[in-house]
Image: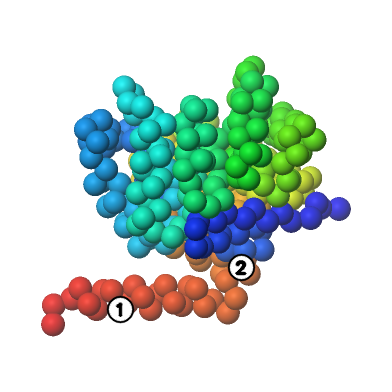
Amino acid sequence: MSAPLRHTVLRSATKEVVIGADKPFCVIGERINPTGRPVLQAALREGDLSIIAKDVAAQVAGGADVLDINMGVPLTDEAELLVTAIRMVQGLTDLPVCIDSSVVEALEAGLEAYEGRALVNSCTAEDDRLAAILPLVKKYDAAIVALPNDEDEIPMEAEKRLALTEKIVRVATEEYGIAIDDIVIDPLAMPIGADSTVGRTTLEVIRGIRERWGLNTTCGASNVSFGMPGRHALNAAWLPLAMSAGMTSAIMDARTPQIVDAVRASDLMLGNDEWGMSWIAAHRARQAAEAAASPA
């Protein structure tokens, strides 16, 4: 017998997004992140956040439901920069945010500044990370993305990842009083170019998480295609497969129609877009935008 489905509720000051298997797939825009973006890194060191405004606009236009915010720039005060970025983003959009940092002090500063109920990205199954991050999640009534790897390894076997998921759920719920609905598991999507079997393993983990705990899941979708050509096509193929296995959200490229369309079409096929109304509305909006952009 499968576990009951969970609903993870995120909020901005004025908007609520619910992640769940019976809800439309949650697109978490990945773009507000300086990793691999030297121009953005240089701008942020100078205190110039104008690129972020463009990233917000592009992701909102592309159909993002939540925006991931990462301000991990070397040689900067990450906590201060994260607070500034969160406040800026909240002034530009009503979408909820995912606060993304490996620095505990930055996470707390971001959670304190955020006006709403955030998703925290992320925490591993390592004892010290659980002890450092879960109290913040409880204190600020947030939800948490947790990864089933520990100080020993990133497990390549599905059952080891599921065992670490069990540890995360036990510690979070029993030791810190976090609601099970507020635990979102990243099943560890790995680069398919390094090992052609890793996709099947991750799908097995997603199914196991869905059946045993009913938890919501997410992943860094672009990890799958890292190092391969034609990355948009690979990501657009991966996400529907993951959705059919039970994945309910992804930190992904919300600016690329090929990828977002694959997700929204899968929502329709999986019964999470009643009467296809969202698909039809998006299609009509795109037609109108194309017509407006065409020469008279």
Can residue 136 be seen from the camera position used here? yes
Which residue is located at x 42 percent, y 31 percent?
A: 79
Point out residue 152 in the picture as x, y percentages from the top left corner. 64, 17
Point out residue 118 in the picture as x, y percentages from the top left corner. 54, 47
Q: Which residue is outermost to the top?
A: 152
Callouts 1 and 2 close, C-beta under 8 Å = no
Label 1 amino acid? Ala
Label 2 amino acid? Asn
Which residue is located at x 49 percent, y 28 percent?
A: 105
Question: In this rendering, would 217 be left or right of 236?
Answer: right
Instruction: Name the mark on residue 165.
Output: none
Up the image or down, 180 lies above or below 25; here it is: above
Q: Give the residue pinned by disc 2.
A: 272
Q: Quick one: quadrant of the C terminus? A: bottom left
Q: Residues within 10 Å of mark 1 (few under 14, many from 20)?
A: few
State the image quarter where residue 57 is shown.
bottom left
Q: Which residue is outermost to the bottom?
A: 296
First in residue order: circle 1 vs circle 2: 2
Question: In this rendering, would 148 be left or right of 120?
Answer: right
Residue placed most toward the observer, 238 or 272:
272
Q: Secondary structure at mark 2?
A: loop
Up the image or down, 84 lies above or below 214; here it is: above
Q: Give the residue pinned by disc 1.
A: 288
Question: In this rendering, would 223 be left or right of 55?
Answer: right
Q: Residues within 10 Å of mark 2 (few under 14, many from 20)?
A: some
Q: Secondary structure at mark 1?
A: helix
What scheme was used to colour the molecule?
Answer: rainbow
Residue placed most toward the observer, 39 or 87:
87
Q: Which residue is outermost to the left?
A: 296
| Cα separation between marks 1 and 2 | 25 Å
